[in-house]
Image: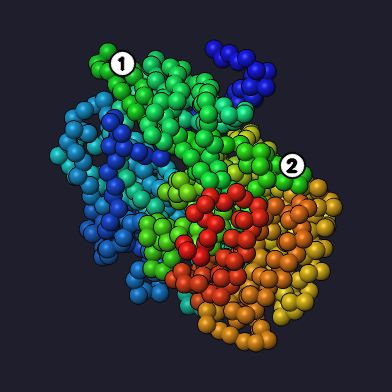
């Protein structure tokens, strides 16, 4: 029962209930595996056996059922690290550029108590694998998943109990082939002219500008829960004056009836609110709000919500404990501002990629920590997960460090009209469900992006984006939704449905190359046109220029560090005029150089990074650093330690 003395508070509580009702469309949760007194986690990272199916139809693995025996018995295998892309770890160009099924295998020793205790669930979880995956345990298929950047899992307890003497052999087949209905889309083109191409020659085409790295990209692990367990938690937060509100809903599986104890604790582990209900509102007196870093002197404050479940059946009693970090904050959009905790927030940040030498898109802790150090060195307060969801471990870092995130799904390169069809849309809706389910509780996530630079002028784009954005809002009515456009403002059919206009433009690069003098007029026109038509706040979601590190010229020429500098500075002059009106952010393209498909406009990858791929600064990084700290001073409330960035 909720009681409230203040009508303002009551209205807010009712709103939070309405929000949670709408959000519960997904039927199972995907909580990040965490150890607790009732849960164990066993990481399966390290070396796996690996074999690419290089047969002409890439189907030999299925025809000969490679999953039925040890992979080494089917033919030659090599060592392959997990997590990592497989493309860059060998000297074999056919593996770097491989398209089709590759096979991974690993044998695991499972603690005997997991097998003997029938009250334990054992779950196999893959953080992400690109693109289609099929998973077998001891030759029995346990799950499959479509899509490269989101987790999937299968319960394997009953299978490993069938014959406790057998080793537990996990086989995962992964196929990176993209077609018109995948996200991102692509197509396979066979080139049959025998005077020009070898027999069976084909290429994978796609319309996005990063290398199609493939393999098992994020940790694979086994974790346990009791038979009755906390399956999902959804929190929605608000505050009034200095009282915080955490509306929560816990979903329980494996028990018809369970008793719950929900405890919200502050940073020091002190209980600040508690409840025995599966859903409700926890009120927090003297709340510490979650603030972006550089906006407040106590940023990124996280409470911990401990959910303790007790249940019993005829055979046993079960207790499950799951602890979720919770940041209390609000997000709102007006027609000129983006408000976090009712205060205007200006995005001065970066676009990134999950990209590194050798490991490709594989989760890499040293790289993650280095990137966060560079983001802070730069004075950036935000990034967009261009162009796909990043690892959950990265989202957790954003929560803890107060870095604001625009969370983008892999809807990049939707350029072919057939990729606006029903099959594509249906898959896109599912991907958004998976993304919202995974990331809904991260305070750092302030907006969803459903796509990057789709062909939004095509006739079916209106219905497509209306449906997609409405669905995303139904899944999560608390966050604004956008997609990133490079279409003409007058012909973009999806723009009416977004909350914030996010525009990419490359004046003096892809258009009028070499003519920096066009930037002021063209950028001004861009902003005036978009704002004039929609009266919505605008983020410059990409701008930039390639610079090969160490290449110089004065006067500046394209591809030199000097040219990159003047392009940035010309954009900044216009941002400084417009940010006083309705421009609410600027995200440089790109944080660091990254690998792309080979082509005549790419010199071993895209060089628009302000850092090299090895994370060394180009001179543009210093320009941006100076600017971002100035912006932080002008638009934020800097903590005392941050007032002197030079000493960082
Ligand atoms: C864009 C794309 C991004 C590219 C960038 C470029 O508009 O969104 O994926 O890498 O331009 O450098 O061409």
Question: Is 134 positioned to the left or the right of 493 in the image?
Answer: left
Residue 455 drawn at (x, y percent): 71, 57
Estimate the spatial distance between the alpha carbons at disc 2 and disc 1, rounded to whole Å: 50 Å
Residue 595 drawn at (x, y percent): 50, 69
For disc 1, the neighbor class at 10 Å (few under 14, some 14 to 19, many from 20) is some
Tell me, yes or no, if residue 131 can be seen here: no
- Image point (52%, 25%), residue name: 285
Q: Quadrant of ligand 1?
A: bottom right
Question: Relative to 400, does residue 179 appear above or below in the rendering?
Answer: below
Badge number at residue 324: none
- Image point (37%, 57%), residue name: 365
What residue is disc 1 on?
312
Tell me, yes or no, if residue 625 can be seen here: yes
Q: Quadrant of residue 158?
A: top left
Q: Quadrant of residue 361?
A: bottom left
For disc 2, the neighbor class at 10 Å (few under 14, some 14 to 19, many from 20) is some
State which tag comes first along the sequence, 2 or 1: 1
- Image point (51%, 23%), residue name: 282
Question: Is 200 positioned to the left or the right of 384 in the image?
Answer: left
Q: Callout 2: helix, strand or loop?
A: loop
Q: Quadrant of residue 484?
A: bottom right
- Image point (65%, 18%), residue name: 6
Question: Relative to 355, does residue 121 appear above or below in the rendering?
Answer: above
Q: Are marks 2 and 1 in contact (CB under 8 Å)?
A: no
Depth check, front residue: 377 or 372: 377
Depth check, front residue: 407 or 554: 554
What residue is disc 2 on?
334
Q: Residue furthest bottom?
A: 554
Residue 624 drawn at (x, y percent): 60, 66
Q: Callout 1: helix, strand or loop?
A: strand
């Amino acid at each position: 029962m909720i009681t409230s003395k203040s009508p303002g508070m009551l209205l807010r509580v009712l709103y939070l209930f309405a929000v949670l009702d709408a959000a519960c469309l997904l039927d199972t949760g995907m909580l990040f595996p965490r150890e607790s007194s009732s849960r164990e986690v066993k990481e399966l990272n390290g070396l796996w056996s690996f074999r690419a199916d290089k047969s002409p139809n890439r189907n030999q693995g299925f025809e000969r059922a490679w999953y039925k025996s040890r992979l080494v018995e089917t033919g030659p295998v090599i060592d392959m690290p997990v997590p990592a892309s497989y493309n860059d770890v060998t000297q074999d160009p056919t593996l770097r550029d491989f398209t089709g099924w590759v096979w991974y295998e690993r044998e695991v020793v499972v603690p005997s108590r997991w097998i003997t205790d029938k009250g334990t669930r054992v779950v196999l979880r893959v953080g992400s694998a690109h693109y289609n995956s099929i998973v077998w345990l001891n030759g029995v298929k346990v799950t499959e998943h479509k899509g490269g950047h989101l987790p999937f899992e299968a319960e394997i307890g009953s299978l490993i109990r069938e014959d406790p003497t057998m080793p537990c052999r996990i086989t995962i087949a992964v196929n990176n082939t993209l077609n018109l209905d995948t996200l991102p889309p692509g197509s396979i083109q066979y080139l049959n002219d025998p005077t020009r191409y070898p027999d069976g020659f084909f290429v994978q085409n796609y319309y996005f500008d990063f290398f199609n790295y493939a393999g098992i990209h994020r940790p694979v692990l086994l974790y346990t829960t009791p038979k009755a367990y906390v399956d999902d938690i959804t929190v929605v937060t608000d505050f009034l004056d200095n009282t915080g509100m955490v509306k929560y809903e816990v979903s329980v599986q494996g028990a018809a009836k369970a008793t719950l104890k929900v405890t919200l604790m502050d940073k020091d582990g002190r209980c600040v609110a508690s409840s025995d209900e599966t859903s409700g509102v926890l009120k927090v007196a003297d709340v510490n709000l979650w603030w972006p870093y550089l906006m407040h002197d106590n940023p990124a404050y996280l409470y911990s919500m401990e959910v303790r479940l007790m249940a019993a059946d005829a055979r046993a009693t079960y207790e499950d404990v799951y602890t979720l970090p919770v940041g209390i904050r609000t997000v709102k959009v007006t027609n000129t501002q983006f408000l976090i905790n009712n205060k205007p927030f200006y995005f001065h940040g970066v676009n990134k990629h999950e990209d590194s030498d050798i490991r490709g898109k594989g989760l890499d802790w040293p790289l993650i920590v280095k990137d966060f150090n560079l983001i802070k060195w730069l004075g950036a307060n935000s990034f967009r997960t261009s162009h796909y969801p990043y690892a959950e471990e990265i989202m957790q870092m954003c929560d803890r460090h107060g870095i604001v995130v625009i969370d983008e799904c892999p809807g990049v390169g939707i350029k072919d009209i057939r990729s606006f069809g029903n099959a594509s849309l249906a898959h896109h809706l599912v991907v958004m469900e998976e993304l919202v389910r995974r990331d809904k509780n991260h305070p750092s996530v302030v907006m969803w992006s459903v796509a990057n630079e789709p062909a939004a002028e095509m006739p079916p784009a209106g219905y497509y984006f209306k449906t997609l954005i409405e669905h995303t809002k139904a899944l999560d009515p608390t966050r604004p939704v956008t997609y990133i456009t490079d279409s003409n403002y007058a012909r973009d059919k999806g723009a009416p449905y977004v909350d914030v206009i996010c525009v990419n433009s490359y004046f003096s690069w892809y258009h009028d190359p070499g003519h920096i003098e066009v930037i002021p007029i063209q950028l001004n026109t861009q902003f005036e046109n978009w704002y004039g038509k929609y009266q919505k706040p605008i983020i410059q979601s990409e701008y930039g220029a390639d610079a090969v590190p160490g290449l110089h010229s004065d006067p500046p020429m394209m591809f030199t560090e000097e040219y990159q500098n003047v392009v940035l500075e010309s954009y900044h002059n216009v941002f400084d005029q417009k940010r006083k009106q309705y421009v609410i952010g600027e995200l440089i393209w790109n944080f660091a150089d990254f690998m792309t498909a080979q082509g005549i406009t790419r010199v071993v990858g895209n060089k628009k990074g302000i850092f090299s791929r090895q994370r060394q600064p180009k001179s543009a990084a210093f320009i941006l650093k100076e600017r971002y700290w100035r912006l932080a001073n002008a638009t934020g409330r800097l903590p005392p330690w941050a007032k002197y960035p030079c000493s960082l």
